[in-house]
Amino acid sequence: MTVALEVIAVEGMGEVRPGDDVAALIAAAAQLEQGDVVVVTQKIVSKAEGRLVPVDDDDPESRLTVIADESVRVLRRRDELVISETRHGFICANAGVDLSNVDSGWATLLPVDADRSARRIRDGLVKLTGARVAVVVSDTFGRPWRRGVTDVAIGCAGLAPVVDLRGTPDDRGRVLVATEVCVVDEIASAAELVMGKASGVPVAVVRGVDQTWFRHGSVRDEVVRSPGEDLFR
Amino acid sequence: MTVALEVIAVEGMGEVRPGDDVAALIAAAAQLEQGDVVVVTQKIVSKAEGRLVPVDDDDPESRLTVIADESVRVLRRRDELVISETRHGFICANAGVDLSNVDSGWATLLPVDADRSARRIRDGLVKLTGARVAVVVSDTFGRPWRRGVTDVAIGCAGLAPVVDLRGTPDDRGRVLVATEVCVVDEIASAAELVMGKASGVPVAVVRGVDQTWFRHGSVRDEVVRSPGEDLFR
């Protein structure tokens, strides 16, 4: 057995505030190496980018107004839960509007363009550390049919989000069909296992990822399904 | 930074045939330690359990008949692709009927009860190695709204599939809502990153998983949503 992958929690980053340089905070807290994938939770990216809005904690309508502003279409609604499509094309609960781990009276919104956020952080990390790394911005989404949330990627930089193994022969020499693997979501999920939800670890490093996956990539362009090809919209 | 998780490909297991003892094959190929989570792909579990049916490679109807037999309900159909609900309650492409990595003229079906499959493998591993390990049986599913497939769990043993962090205060002392994390799916995804699709590595070990998650668990009982609570069925 050979170790193939390490998933490492980056501790000691401290609080992130609007205007903070996320790349600088990560570079100071982590010992990055060439080929690392740095997974950064949406929460600190949104905070650094000032994507915060005031909400009235005692008035549910206040939150629903924000969710409506962030949505282009509501798919389902049950009680307090709204499943909607954001302007990025993500389908998730409450349009990504999040009250957890922010000061009372505030909510975070998703970054305007999480691929761009990832690129900025990546550019900063490459400059500060000299290491060729990739960056994934992750968020916690529910899914239909299965209970429990998992972390997925909402943005990436320097990494192929989907690796196309179509046409690669299987071990029988028969041709595989429909095996485009969304490695960026699998990386976000792996990172979540060491970050937990309330332990204050907003960044993890995934070390040992296949280096052939390192290239320019975009979650919005390559992972978000267009309505025309989507059987469930 | 401290290493929190290792994901290790188990190589050299060789071909799995009907009647093979999967636990014995894994125990011989891997050096398992107390607290490891052993992720086993559905394909070898199905082969060992003899869940193979003949299909006529030249006749698409042959495959569709098998898919119909494995389905309780078809949700969507486009060209060759059928999204259906299996009798286990999984919603996936082609009811889990798979032609890849099997001999020409054959397809694998999902295990009858993948939680039971996981329990059998776990019992065997505990007996053979003396190590308290957990087992996850994984398969590759697509999802709505996002391109690319990811690995999820279809069965587990010795592990909580969903970890309930609801009611755990966030780092502001505010109460988190709806943060039941499906760790078993995240573990399956992490494992897939080292297994690839055509590299003949059907088992991976995830080492360093939070030991408080080790308990009796079932994917079918705890992950599969009942139709009544599902907003997308």
Image (cartoon, coloured by chain):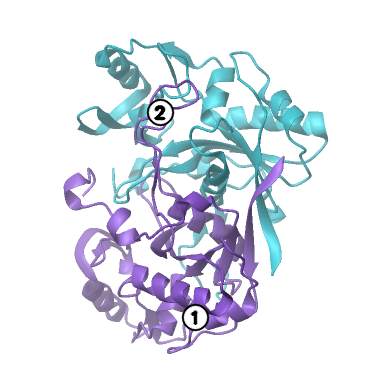
Chain colours: A cyan, B purple
- Image quarter for residue B93? bottom left
Amino acid carrying label 2: it is Gly
- The residue that disc 2 covers is A96
Visible in this render: residue A98? yes
The quadrant of the image that shows the N terminus of chain B is top right
- The residue that disc 1 covers is B22
Amino acid carrying label 1: it is Val
- The single residue placed furthest to the front in the displayed view is B130
Residue pictured at 39% horizontal, 24% vertical: A97
- Cα gap from disc 1 to disc 2, whole angstroms: 42 Å
Mark 1: secondary structure: helix
Count of marks placed on residues: 2
Give the chain of mark 1: B
Residue pictured at 70% horizontal, 43% vertical: B2
Give the class, few, some or many, for how many residues have Cα within 10 Å of label 1's Cα (few <14, many ≥20): many
Residue A88, above or below A193: above
Tell me, for residue B102, which label it has, or none: none
